[in-house]
Image (cartoon, grey):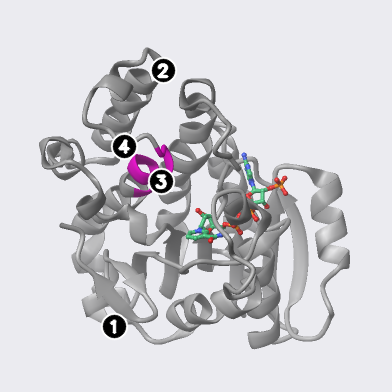
């Protein structure tokens, strides 16, 4: 029996990941479709075409500090562990949003939501399982001024990584980031923070995870035609969420390739972090 979970699954890529997992798994398996709003979750579960695995809805607001740990404990009690986790949730921001106004909520969802998910779900991963954080090609140090690289390369624990992200958040909030070397697009440091968090935890867990066939990685889905990306770019010809989900599902459900462990992966290839 396989148990899978996707965060931010009420629309976009997350919804496509749930549908793809359900199609690739069997009626003995369970896929948890999670989100922050029970009505949207219910609607999304009802929209599933049926066949394959059972799709169950659960509330998981990743910005809620205790939520990931609580749900992980419940699922461990219910199933004994978990096989596939996608950390996919993202807060939607647009070009008209002032970074100073949104960065607090943005980091709570995208960054601290990710590190809480990592802390809660990696301990209950079953052998041959995978936990994949959906990041972006923007999540590499090539997109950041060299003077800032050590913010994301020196932390050696998730707590230290959270502290660095909080430091950046505070610099955005009080305007120091704008006058410094930080990019104006909050997505860039946020995605680098996600990828760096995965790298930090992977360093700790590498030996035991590889021995058990577990993959911990971040992934770049490429440009996708969703309302979030449409706020920034013309994505009318970009892949649909279902098309973009294919490579991510292949990664999660294939036997472990140790070369991908802890790395940012795009279409099966490792993207160098620095
Ligand atoms: N779209 C692209 O071109 C692109 C490119 C590179 C990377 N990505 C990454 O791919 C992932 C999915 O992107 P997308 O375009 O599919 O996004 P999307 O369509 O905006 O969907 C985002 C999902 O996250 C959920 N969410 C927001 N806040 C949440 C919270 N506090 N707790 C739980 N869920 C929450 C949303 O729920 P509601 O329905 O309640 O709003 C929604 O289900 C993101 O990590 C994004 O950064 C996307």
| Dots 3, 2 in contact, CB < 8 A | no
Position of 128 relative to 85 (above/below):
below
Q: Nearer the viewer, residue 178 or 261?
A: 178
Spot occupied by residue 97 in the image (x, y as percentages of width and height): 56, 30
Nearer to us of marks 4 and 3 is 4
Q: Secondary structure at mark 4?
A: loop
Neighbours of disc 2 within 10 Å: few (<14), some (14-19), many (20+): some
Quick check: 133 left or right of 68?
Answer: left
Of the residues under marks 1 and 3, which one precedes in the sequence? 3
Q: CA distance from mark 1 to mark 2?
A: 40 Å
Q: Give coordinates of residue 63: x percent, y percent.
A: 57, 35
Label drawn at residue 257: 1
The residue under the point 36% across, 73% down is 266
Above or below: residue 4 compared with residue 91? below
Distance in Å between CA atoms under marks 3 and 2: 27 Å
What residue is shown at x 76% (from left), y 69% (from top)?
55
Which quarter shows the N terminus? bottom right
Sequence-first tag of 3 and 2: 3
Instruction: Report if the CB atoms under discs 1 and 2 are less than 8 Å apart.
Output: no
Secondary element at image label 1: loop
Q: Position of residue 148 (x, y in %)?
A: 16, 36
Circles 4 and 3, Cβ within 8 Å, touching? The answer is no
> Of all residues shown, which one is farthest toward the top?
174
Residue at image mark 4: 183
Tag in front: 3 or 2 = 2
Q: CA distance from mark 4 to mark 2?
A: 14 Å
User: Assess mark 1: CB under 8 A from ligand 1?
Assistant: no
Marks 1, 3: nearer the viewer: 1
Confirm or reject: label 3 Cβ below 8 Å from ligand 1. no
- Mark 4 vs ligand 1: CB under 8 Å? no
Label 3 belongs to which residue? 119
Q: CA distance from mark 1 to mark 3?
A: 23 Å
């Amino acid at each position: 029996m396989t148990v899978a979970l996707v965060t931010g699954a009420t629309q976009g890529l997350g919804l496509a990941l749930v549908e793809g997992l359900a199609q690739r798994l069997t009626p003995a398996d369970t896929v948890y479709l999670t989100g922050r709003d029970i009505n949207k979750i219910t609607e999304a579960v009802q929209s599933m075409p049926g066949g394959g695995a059972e799709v169950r809805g659960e509330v998981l607001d990743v910005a809620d500090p205790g939520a990931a740990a609580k749900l992980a404990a419940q699922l461990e009690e219910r199933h004994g562990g978990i096989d596939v986790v996608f950390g996919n949730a993202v807060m939607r921001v647009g070009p008209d949003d002032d970074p100073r106004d949104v960065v607090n909520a943005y980091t709570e969802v995208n960054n601290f939501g990710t590190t809480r998910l990592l802390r809660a779900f990696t301990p209950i991963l079953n052998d041959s399982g995978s936990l994949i954080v959906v990041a972006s090609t923007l999540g590499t140090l090539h997109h950041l001024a060299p003077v800032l690289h050590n913010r994301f390369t020196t932390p050696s624990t998730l707590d230290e990584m959270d502290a660095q992200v909080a430091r950046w958040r505070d610099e955005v909030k009080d305007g120091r980031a704008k006058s410094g070397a930080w990019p104006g697009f909050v997505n860039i440091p946020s995605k680098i923070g996600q990828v760096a968090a995965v790298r930090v935890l992977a360093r700790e867990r590498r030996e035991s995870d590889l021995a058990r066939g577990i993959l911990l990685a971040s992934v770049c889905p490429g440009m996708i035609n969703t309302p979030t990306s449409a706020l920034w770019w013309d994505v009318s010809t970009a892949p649909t969420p279902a098309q973009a989900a294919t490579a991510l599902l292949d990664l999660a459900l294939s036997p472990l390739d140790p070369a991908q462990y802890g790395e940012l992966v795009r279409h099966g290839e490792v993207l160098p972090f620095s």
